[in-house]
Amino acid sequence: MGKPAPPLIGVTAPLGGDLPVGGVLVLESVCFSYRDQDAPAVNDVSLSLAAGETAAVMGPSGCGKSTLLYLAAGLLRPDRGVISVGGAEITSLGLEGRAEVRRTSLGIVFQFGELVAELSLRDNVALAAELSGLRRHQALARSGELLERVGLSDLCDRYPAQVSGGEGQRCAVA
């Protein structure tokens, strides 16, 4: 099995919160090298995305697109440079701190959804809500609302293998 497909990234406001004005996702002079490669995978990349702004990361296979997205999501830590999400610098955070940013402020949707195969769509969404601190009954209620918002309320009891790729991605968004 090859590398996972690059994720799509979006920054979200905390529940009931507002997004900051200006750059919501900011990368400043970010560099990253895999230890077993001679050339850097990402070399001196800077970008700033505002709330609601969309950007496409394009290039040939092996040019660092996925690595750049993993850095922006805090899944990798850069060798140099600074990454900020919602005005908070995440570069120096440890694994738990970066995971908290992903739970509360940064949405990641992988090409294949990356859902837990053994859980229904409802339970996949509820799991994310529970990890964010909601009690089980609140998480299930919230998951129903979110699945309805993405047009999947009629499929909430199905498992990831029983839905299309696009439906799995919408579940991941929820």
Image: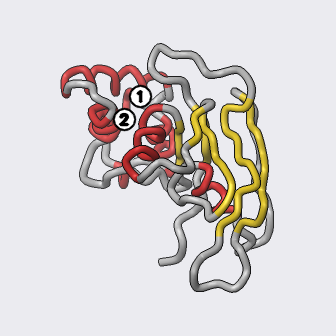
**Which of the two discs, 2 and 1, sits closer to the camera?**
1
**Label pair 2/1, CB-CB below 8 angstroms:** yes
Residue shown at 73% from the left, 32% from the top:
23
Q: In this view, does 23 lie to the left or right of 79?
A: right
**Residue 9 figure quarter:** top right
Question: Which residue position is annotated with label 2?
Answer: 155
Image quadrant assignment for residue 80: bottom right
Residue position for label 1: 147
Whether residue 160 is situated above or below residue 171 in the rendered picture: below
Q: Where is residue 106 in the image (x, y as percent from the top left)?
A: 53, 38
Task: Confirm whether residue 157 shows in the render.
Answer: no
Q: Is mark 1 on a helix, strand or loop?
A: helix
Residue in the image at 42% along x and 47% along y: 163
Q: In this view, does 154 lie above or below 159?
A: above
Residue nearest the viewer, comparing 113 with 56? 56
Q: Which of marks 2 and 1 is nearer the N terminus?
A: 1
Q: What residue type is labelled 1?
A: Leu
Tell me the element at label 2: helix
Q: Picture coordinates of residue 20 (x, y %)? A: 64, 21
**Which of 28/131 is in front?**
28
